[in-house]
């Protein structure tokens, strides 16, 4: 069967269009898939360094809290578990941290010698059997006292215990600016006296009271700012006063004895 010249021209034109479409669309699809994969790449394992020994890292298994602080991937609060796991890094394992330079996020290469106890690690495996580590991202240092187990205002102080009014912290609603000429009022004006700076929210007292035992090993501290740096100052039971706002961490599973008490300032009616 003969193919007419017009049919040949039509087929040639279609082949040309197909080729052009493949050249233009295929790279875009590949680029899109790579970009989408990078954006949605969640770590296979999150942990906090417990100990280091050569190429072996023992971690406490951790997870991101559901109470995110709204700063995006890698910035949620870390919740530690009692489970541990030992991972082994190899010469092929990429160990990095993220730094900000000139308004850009860049990755800085590290080695196992740069890792420290309490480093937060995001870990990716190279294989489905989860035996080979392909990448470790160091996400800062875990603060075990980032979130208190109990918040309260001291009602009574005794030599070996304190009685507190249990309190909660509420996020204040942002004030709406009714005039373009009036600057929005700062949140700091709503903080309790001596509050925890930008991290503190509105304090709300409940009707519940609780007595917390203080042992010889209980650490009592307050935080102060000097020369732009935050430092901790050790206190004693004698330094505690009624109406002190305190953050409390327990030393026992029954939650009766304080392991750590942090004084966060003084509560007053005007600070509500």
Image (cartoon, grey):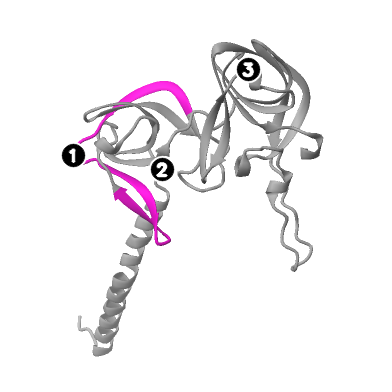
Residue located at (69% from left, 49% from top): 187
Residue 13 lies left or right of residue 239; in this view the side is left
Label 3 belongs to which residue?
Answer: 237
Residue 254 appearing in the image: no
* Magenta stretch, main secondary structure class: strand
User: Which of pointers 3 and 2 lies earlier in the amino acid sequence?
Assistant: 2
Please tell me whether mark 3 sits on a helix, a strand or a loop.
helix
Q: Nearer the viewer, mark 3 or mark 2?
A: 3
Label 1 belongs to which residue?
Answer: 91
Residue located at (53% from left, 48% from top): 71
The numbered disc on residue 29 is: none
Residues shaded magenta = 80-108
Q: Is residue 103 above or below residue 223?
A: below
Q: Which of marks 1 and 3 is in front?
A: 3
C-beta proximity under 8 Å, tags 1 and 3: no
Label 2 belongs to which residue?
Answer: 42
Please tell me whether mark 2 sits on a helix, a strand or a loop.
loop
Q: Nearer the viewer, mark 1 or mark 2?
A: 1
Residue located at (75% from left, 57% from top): 176
Frontmost residue, 208 versus 242:
242
Across and down, in percent, residue 36 comes to 40, 55
Across and down, in percent, residue 11 comes to 27, 80
> Magenta stretch: residue 172 in it?
no
Residue 188 appearing in the image: yes
Q: Which residue lies furthest to the bottom in this view?
A: 5
Please tell me whether mark 1 sits on a helix, a strand or a loop.
loop
Q: Could you classify mark 1 by the number of other residues whose Cα lies within 10 Å: few (under 14), some (14-19), or many (20 or more)?
A: few
């Amino acid at each position: 069967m003969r193919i007419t010249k017009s049919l040949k021209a039509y087929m040639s034109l279609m082949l040309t269009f197909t080729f052009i479409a493949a050249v233009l669309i295929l790279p875009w699809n590949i680029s899109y898939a790579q970009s989408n994969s990078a954006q949605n790449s969640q770590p296979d394992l999150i942990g906090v360094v417990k100990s280091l020994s050569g190429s072996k890292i023992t971690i406490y298994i951790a997870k991101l809290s559901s109470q995110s602080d709204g700063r995006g991937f890698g910035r949620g609060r870390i919740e530690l578990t009692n489970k541990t796991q030992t991972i082994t890094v190899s010469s092929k394992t990429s160990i990095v941290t993220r730094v900000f330079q000139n308004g850009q996020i860049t990755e800085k290469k590290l080695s196992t010698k740069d890792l420290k106890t309490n480093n937060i690690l995001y870990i990716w495996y190279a294989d489905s059997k989860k035996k080979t580590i392909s990448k470790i991202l160091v996400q800062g240092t875990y603060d075990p006292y980032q979130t208190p187990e109990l918040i309260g205002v001291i009602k009574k102080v005794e030599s070996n215990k304190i009685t507190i009014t249990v309190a909660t912290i509420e996020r204040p609603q942002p004030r709406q600016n009714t005039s373009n000429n009036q600057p929005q009022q700062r949140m700091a004006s709503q903080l309790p006296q001596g509050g925890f700076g930008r991290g503190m929210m509105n304090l709300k007292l409940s009707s519940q009271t609780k007595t917390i035992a203080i042992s010889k090993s209980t650490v009592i501290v307050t935080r102060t700012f000097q020369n732009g740096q935050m430092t901790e100052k050790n206190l004693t039971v004698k330094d505690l006063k009624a109406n002190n706002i305190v953050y409390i961490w327990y030393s026992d599973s029954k939650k009766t004895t304080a392991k750590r008490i942090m004084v966060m300032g003084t509560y007053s009616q005007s600070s509500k």
